Image: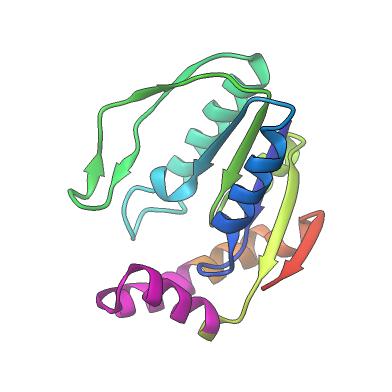
């Protein structure tokens, strides 16, 4: 089973992913992959590179294969050494870009969590620090353009508001 949780920054995607992980772990093996670990920094996050990574992850998951995953280190601004992600029955993709067209076309159950830009920004700054204010304002524009082009919200199955 493949699940994807998408929506603007600060909407509660990670919280929902943790809740679903806890529920599914009662009956299945579960892995959560956070889009923050797949992005290539701020400016190149929602790129074709991300889509290609997702294609590889989905292929491995559907084939029941383990796969290497290099996570982006936001402290060093580069990818760490790859670690092996073991095959699980349930894979949850969580973050901006998680429910993009490629993932929807792969048969994922998709969730969209809506929140206002103001609330989302404040939640992120409260969680990660005020020093990210300008970067987050740019990110909000970037994610909005991605969502509009991809029509993510319109195409997700489950719609929630936080």
Magenta residue span: 119-142
Q: Is residue 80 above or below residue 74?
A: above
Q: Position of residue 63 (x, y in %)?
A: 65, 15
Q: Is residue 108 above or below residue 132?
A: above
Q: Is residue 37 above or below residue 111?
A: above
Q: State the quadrant of the N terminus.
A: top right
Verify whether residue 131 appears in magenta.
yes
Main secondary structure along the magenta-highlighted residues: helix
Instruction: Say left or right for 32 vs 162.
Output: left
Q: Nearer the viewer, residue 86 or 156?
A: 86
What's the residue at 52%, 76% (across, down)? Answer: 120
Q: Is residue 128 above or below residue 31?
A: below
What's the residue at 47%, 75% (across, down)? Answer: 123
Q: State the quadrant of the C terminus.
A: bottom right
Q: How is the image coloured?
A: rainbow
Q: Position of residue 136 (x, y in %)?
A: 38, 73
Q: Position of residue 159 (x, y in %)?
A: 78, 63
Verify whether residue 31 appears in magenta.
no
Write down the quadrant of residue 29 in the picture. Answer: top right
Instruction: Say left or right for 34 vs 92.
Output: left
Q: Nearer the viewer, residue 104 or 86?
A: 86
Can residue 99 be seen? no
What's the residue at 58%, 69% (across, down)? Answer: 11
């Amino acid at each position: 089973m493949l699940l994807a949780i998408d929506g603007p920054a600060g909407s509660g995607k990670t919280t929902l992913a943790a809740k679903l992980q806890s529920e599914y772990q009662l009956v299945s093996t579960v892995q959560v992959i956070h889009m923050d670990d797949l992005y290539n920094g701020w400016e190149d996050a929602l790129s074709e590179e991300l889509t290609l990574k997702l294609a590889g992850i989905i292929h491995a998951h559907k084939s029941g294969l383990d796969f290497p995953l290099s996570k982006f280190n936001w402290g060093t601004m580069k990818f760490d050494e790859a670690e092996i992600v073991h095959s699980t029955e349930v894979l949850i993709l969580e973050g901006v870009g998680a429910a993009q067209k490629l993932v929807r076309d792969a048969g994922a159950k998709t969730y969209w969590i809506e929140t206002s830009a103001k609330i989302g920004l404040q939640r992120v700054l409260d969680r990660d620090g005020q020093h990210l204010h300008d970067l987050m304002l740019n990110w909000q524009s970037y994610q909005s353009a991605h969502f509009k082009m991809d029509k993510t919200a319109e195409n997700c199955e489950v719609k929630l508001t936080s």
